Image: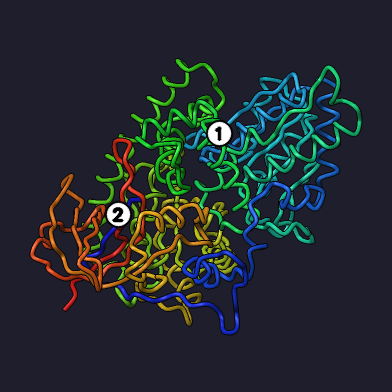
Amino acid sequence: MSTLCHPVPKKIVRRFPRSGFLFSGAGVPPLLARLYQSRSISSVEDLGRSLKELPPPSSLKGMDGMTAALESAILGRKQIMVVADFDADGATSCAVALRGLRALGAERVSYIVPNRFTCGYGLTPELVELAAEQRPDVLLTVDNGIACHAGVAAAKSRGMTVLVTDHHLPGESLPDADAIVNPNLSGDAFPGKALAGVGVVFYVLLALRSRLRSSGWLGGERPEPNLAELLDLVALGTVADVVPLDRVNRILVHQGLQRIRAGRACPGIQALLEAGGKNWAALASDALGFTVGPRLNAAGRLDDMSLGIECLLADDPAVVQEYAGLLDDMNRERKDIEAQMKAEAWAMLDAVDVGGRDQSGVCLFDPSWHQGVIGILASRIKERLHRPVVAFARADDGLLKGSARSIAGVHVRDVLCAVAARHPELIVRFGGHAMAAGLTLEPHRLAAFAAAFDAEVAAALDGVDLEHTVVTDGELPPDQFRLDTASALREAGPWGQGFPEPLFDGEFEVLNMRIVGAKHLRLSLQVPGTARQVEGIAFFVADPPEWLGCWRLRAAYRLEVNEFRGASSLQLGIEYMEWAD
């Protein structure tokens, strides 16, 4: 896993369970029991990963109307057009929708995905104009639509049926769609509020299959499809969108990982894993987010997400390899662009002392910055400053497109809502989540917006600890520095947002240290309290030569299985380290 070792020490904070909160479960090793307990898991029943333990699709509000409309479209041989989004969640949602609808008997299914640079996000009136050229009867949005009032109205005015599947937080009013399924709607009883867009459309397909089974459409000459075959795509979109891995999402991701590990992933995912040098047979969830996700996202960031969607839809090996190669090349190009933008941002920060303790929210803009990469740049700046950040780039229409990233304790979409309420003239449009959002400004409003954003973030930060912290699970007992323990931890997941992978801390004697790949450190460390040694790797160290004289360090690390040339070995994946006295 790619990590960043900061030269400025962080505060290591150990994670403890809530007072009086106990884990019960026979046969669970003490180390795992402690980890589960600190993640508010009370029993082995909470760890179930069977598909049978998923809540029923019928518990999602609006599902009857959604499936009735889709059934009518399938039986009436209507043209269904899926309206996708240009990120990994949107691409996987689109692939799941097309593969699933076709498997359920839909004969006329197509898709359209907005270009980030010309159409903007979601179902806009401009996108409706493009869609209308293909004369669809039904528009089905995936991973977007809940805030697309104007686009929905434009489609309805043309006589189209509009069906919205989304997971983003709704605003004060809903678009006038024919049906909406979103677990975050007011009054929705579905327990998995953290579903990604791909999870929502997967649930719609499950409910649609039940309806088509009951009506007699499925069965006999039209066999009922196994929709579990789509779970590799569901797992990828869920992990790549960094939604919290609550119980529902853990089940979906686990089942998807099982399919990938068994060699039953769609050809596109297999090819992207190969491009990233990953062994699918021993895949962990983080590889989806750090290997496949970026290559898929590169299409939407630099060109057109239809390239990524086609990669996930293709079954011909030669076609898949061609798309995977293009995406891999785009990802390398994206890295080069990101590196240049980061260097410019660091220089800008150093020159004006942005991010000092007196500044709460940070806004940065450079006219040369790439619109498709500002989200990654905002994340990198946020990691360095530990402040909410908005990075801006100039769009083709002359407006400024901003990408916001936040820290724990500050809901950035709520911050933008507060700015818009106090200063209605500042923001053209915005939307997003607690930790990430997007917005559009007129260029001459940037300075005023930066001041308003800083003020609202300052209010939101009241009582929030701004010190850099690394939260760990404490020290790992010396007898647990074993390959079988690392394997057990990997299998105990899937780990991710809201259900963090185990991270331990401790002090180590450094037996050997060398620089690898210019930016990384390979270490040989002595296991505390023993004469044994263990290998460690620290990726993307800020100044590698500065560490070469270190003989004792304190580290926050993951216990990992290192797969290399068919062999497995124990390795510490170092997330953070500092010199120890």
User: In the image, is 345 to the left or to the right of 188?
Assistant: left
Q: Which image quarter holds the C terminus?
A: bottom left
Between the residue at mark 1 and the residue at mark 2, the CA separation in whole angstroms equals 43 Å
Snapshot colouring: rainbow
Read off the residue under disc 2: 571
Q: Is residue 33 left or right of residue 333?
A: right
Q: Residue at x 53, y 77 (%)?
A: 17
Q: Quick one: label 1 or label 2, which is nearer the N terminus? A: 1
- Rendered image: mark on residue 114: 1
Picture coordinates of residue 138, whole percent (x, y): 76, 29
**Badge 2 amino acid:** Gln
Eyeballing the image, is 119 above or below 571? above
User: Residue 192 occupies which quadrant of the picture?
Assistant: bottom right
Instruction: Decide: is 325 above or below 495.
Output: above
Residue 503 at what x, y percent from top left? Answer: 39, 65
Instruction: Depth check: give the residue in front, 365 or 498.
Output: 498
Could you say whether the residue bearing mark 2 is in a helix, strand or loop? strand
Nearest the viewer among 245 and 90 is: 245
Q: Position of residue 464 (x, y in %)?
A: 46, 78
Q: Is residue 68 visible?
A: yes
Q: Nearer the viewer, residue 566 or 503?
A: 566
Dividing the picture into quadrants, the one containing residue 198 is: top right
Looking at the image, which residue is at 52% across and 61% down? 499
Residue situated furthest left in the rendering:
549
Q: From this view, report whether residue 235 is shown above or below residue 98.
A: below
Q: Quadrant of residue 119?
A: top right
Tell whether 98 sits left or right of 36.
right
What type is the residue that disc 1 sits on? Pro
Who is closer to the viewer here, 450 or 35? 35
Residue at 39% x, 31% y is: 274
Please tell me how crowded label 2 is: few (under 14), some (14-19), or many (20+) other residues with Cα within 10 Å.
many
Task: Name the outermost residue toward the bottom.
Answer: 19
